[in-house]
Structure formats: C-alpha cells, structure tokens
Image (spheres, grey):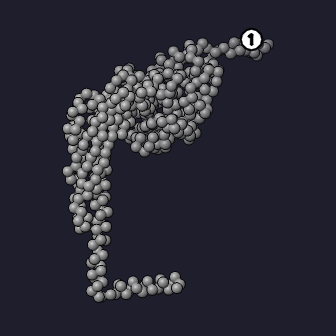
C-alpha cells in the first residue's frame, strides 16, 4: 500500500471521528481526559516542587555557611548547631508553596588534617493541585548542603586600578572604604594566623615593586640602562661637534621601583625568573609616577600578608594617576600568589587545602602597555594571561567601574571565572555592595560546599 493511500485512510478516519455522534465517542473522550489532565497537571505540580527545592538549596547553602562562620568565630558551640540551623533556615526559606519544611544538621568535628564538616538535610512537600485527581495529595522533595572548613586556606590578590580616571565621579573615594571592608570581611573568617593572606597590587601603565629591590637578580636593566644615564664625548671634529661618545647608565640605586611588561610571551605567564635568562626577568622602567616625591604616586605592591592594618593603610595611600594596563596588574597579582621570586610567599602547608583568587577592579578600557597602544592588542594578551591563570586554578573576579557610559569591557567579562564573577558598577556608590558580594563568594570558596 502506498504512503499516499495510508495518508488518505488516516485522514478519512480522523474526519469520521470528528463527525461522530455516537455515545461511545463521548465516553472514550471522558475517559481519556482524566489521564491527559493528570499528566499536564503533574508537570505543573512538579515545576512547583522543583522551584521549592531550588529555593531550599539556596537557603541550606547560606545556612551552612553562616553556621561554619559562627563555629569558627566561637559565637556558638557544637550543641547549638541544630537550633541555630533551624533558626537560620526558617529566616532564609520563604517559599510559600512548601508545607512543613525542615532541616536536620549533622556535625563532624575535625580530626588531625581532616576538615570539620556540617551536613544539612532539608525536606518538605507541596500540596498538589492536579495530581490529587490521581490520588497524590502531596509531592515531597528534599536536598542537602555540606560545608567543610578548618583545612581550607585562602590567598587573595587585590589588583586595583589607580589610573587618572579613577579621580572622576567619586570612584577612588568609593573604592577605598569598599576595599578595606572586604579585608575586614575576609579577616573575620580567619580563625588562625595564615588562614587568609591578602596582597595589594596598585596598577596603571606600570606597577611599583619598590625601589629598595634595585639589587635583586630578577630585574632586567636593559631598557632602564638605555634610557637613564649620561653621554661622555671622547672625540670632536674641527667644528666642535662630538663625533664619538660612550653612554654611562645611572647607578641602579636611583631607580624608582617601576616595572613595565615582561618580555613576550612571559607577559602572559607566572614563570619564576631565572638568573642568566633575560627573557624571564622583569624589566625596570623609570616611570615618573613611581617617584615617591610625586604627588601622584603609585605605591609599591604589598606582598601577601595578614597584617590587616598595613593592608588598609596601603589602600588609603592610593592616588589616581597614569594610563590603563590591566594585564600588568593581573600578571603581578598572580606573581604575588606564586611560589619563589620575586615575592617568596610563605610555603603552603601540605596539611591544608589552598584556594587562590585574584580580584581586579578597573574603571576603563586598556590604553597602553609596553608593546601596544591599541586596546584590542592589549586585550588579546590579557585573555591569554587569564586563560593561563585559570588553568592553574586561580579564581578571578572582575569589576568594571563604568560611570561614564563606556562600552562594557569584553576582556574583563572574559577574564572572570564565570558570568556571576563579573560585576558592572555604573555608580561609585555601588562599589561597596559589589565588594561585599565578592567577599561572600570568597567566603564560600573558603567554607566550601
């Protein structure tokens, strides 16, 4: 039988069904309507239950985080965990469909190098609207959250834009208290010295590593020597013009501490510098804004420390100046987290897990680095750098302070760990709230789910 013939028979049968008036057709429809309505209704009821479960998951995650913080800070004891879990959960879980939602908390104390752990199990149900036709009056759901802490330590590099445009629209004024509040937020979850380390990397076109490092092997002096020194004439012609001379570089102790971008492609890596391999070294530059006597002064990088007062003091010293080179800030932020020279951070204890992160805030698009003045070329290098850092498990948070209606930074979006790790600030007053959100995310990294 041909396909056309089958189609005709089916079409004719459908036509006869539509025109039928016999009672059995009505009976068949009535009988089939019940499962159809039940199936459609079940999808609706299931969606409501899924929404209630998703809300429960968020409430359990936050409850677990707060319990871990409370135990770490000593504001509650282990005997208070169940009571406090119920209180936090009741305040955070606001889904109106849920019937008798509850939470059970189980605590496992740390032993040796094993982390402390809290497991929260939440259960609830919804009253069905459609499935009750099939005899199901309620639809249950549940989920769980686990936090571990005590053997997770964190190191965070704050990479902060100090370019000239940060003077506009109150951006620098807003940045300082927001960054200091983030330091307070992170220091609060450190139970012991060394649980949290923070570095600060101010950047514009260059960074300042401190002029006192002038005798370190990891500095490449070739660019600096060629630009800083004096010429001595050794021969003159009959007109009195110098025809032969030699160049004498200034003493390196007159260097002001500024660094320009590393030789490509080390500008996208955190390779430890090696004496004798010039390409791996860091090129010195006499950028005027690194002069300590300059009113527009880029302060030196502060290596990882848990001296909270010193960190906040460094933030207070920030002054807007210079052009934008996000890549150099990111590169040096990564170097502060890297073992070995030039910062030699404290060795990581094998009895602990470590999570490293970079938070970069910038108010503009890239304008200048050692190699380019074209933003797209600078961005291309920065993307490679971010890919390399993330491949080594560096978590990156990016903030664009855009109060002037500039295009949203594609490279900052690209460098962010994920879409929720990029923040767009359109008013300086939003900076504090954004840093608080980042602090919450960093807290979740330390008190890991």
Residue 247 visible in rendering: yes
Residue 301 image position (x, y, % from top left): 47, 23
Residue 42 placement: quadrant: bottom left
Mark 1 crowdedness (10 Å alpha carbons): few <14, some 14-19, many ≥20? few
Residue farthest to the front, as pictured: 111
Q: Is residue 202 left or right of residue 237?
A: left
Q: Is residue 17 left or right of residue 264?
A: left
Q: Is residue 385 left or right of residue 18?
A: right
Rendered residue at 52%/82% (across/down)? 3
Looking at the image, residue 56 lies above or below residue 392: below
Looking at the image, residue 6 lies above or below residue 106: below
Residue 429 image position (x, y, % from top left): 33, 36
Residue that numbered label 1 is attached to: 234
Residue 441 image position (x, y, % from top left): 37, 37
Query: Toward the viewer: 9 or 385?
Result: 9
Rendered residue at 24%/46% (across/down)? 93
Element on which disc 1 rests: strand
Rendered residue at 51%/35% (across/down)? 392
């Amino acid at each position: 039988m041909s396909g056309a013939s089958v189609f005709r028979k089916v079409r004719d049968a459908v036509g006869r069904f539509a025109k039928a008036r016999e009672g059995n057709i009505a009976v068949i429809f009535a009988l089939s309507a019940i499962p159809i309505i039940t199936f459609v209704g079940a999808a609706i009821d299931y969606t409501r239950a899924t929404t209630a479960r998703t809300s429960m998951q968020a409430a359990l995650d936050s409850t677990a985080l707060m319990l871990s913080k409370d135990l770490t800070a000593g504001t509650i004891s282990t005997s208070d965990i169940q009571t406090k879990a119920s209180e936090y959960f009741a305040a955070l879980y606001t889904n109106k469909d849920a019937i008798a939602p509850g939470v059970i908390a189980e605590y496992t104390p740390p032993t040796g190098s094993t982390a402390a752990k809290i497991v929260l199990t939440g259960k609830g149900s919804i009253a069905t609207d459609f499935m009750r036709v099939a005899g199901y009056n309620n639809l249950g759901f549940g989920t769980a959250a686990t936090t571990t802490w005590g053997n997770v330590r964190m190191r965070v590099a704050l990479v902060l834009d100090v370019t000239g445009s940060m003077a506009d629209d109150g951006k620098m004024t807003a940045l300082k208290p927001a960054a200091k509040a983030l330091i307070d937020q992170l220091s609060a979850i450190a139970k012991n010295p060394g649980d949290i380390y923070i570095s600060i990397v101010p950047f514009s076109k260059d960074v300042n590593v401190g002029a006192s490092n002038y005798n370190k092997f990891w500095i490449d002096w070739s660019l600096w020597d060629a630009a800083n020194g004096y010429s001595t004439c050794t021969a003159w012609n009959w007109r009195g013009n110098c025809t032969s001379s030699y160049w004498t570089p200034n003493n390196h102790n007159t260097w002001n501490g500024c660094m320009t971008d590393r030789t490509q492609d080390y500008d996208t890596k955190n390779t430890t510098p090696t004496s004798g391999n010039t390409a791996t070294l860091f090129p010195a530059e006499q950028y005027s804004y690194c002069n300590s006597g300059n009113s527009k002064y880029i302060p030196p990088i502060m290596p990882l420390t848990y001296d909270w007062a010193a960190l906040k003091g460094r933030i207070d010293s920030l002054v807007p100046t210079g052009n934008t080179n996000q890549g150099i800030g990111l590169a040096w932020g990564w170097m502060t987290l890297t073992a070995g020279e030039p910062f030699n951070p404290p060795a990581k204890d094998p009895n602990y897990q470590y999570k490293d992160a970079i938070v970069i805030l910038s108010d503009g698009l890239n304008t200048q680095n050692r190699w380019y003045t074209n933003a797209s070329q600078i961005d291309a290098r920065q993307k490679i750098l971010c890919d390399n850092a993330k491949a080594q498990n560096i978590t990156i948070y990016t903030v664009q302070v855009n109060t002037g209606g500039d295009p949203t930074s594609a490279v900052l979006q690209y460098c962010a760990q994920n879409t929720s790790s990029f923040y767009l600030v359109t008013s300086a007053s939003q900076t504090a709230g954004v840093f608080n959100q980042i602090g919450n995310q960093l807290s979740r990294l330390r008190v890991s789910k």
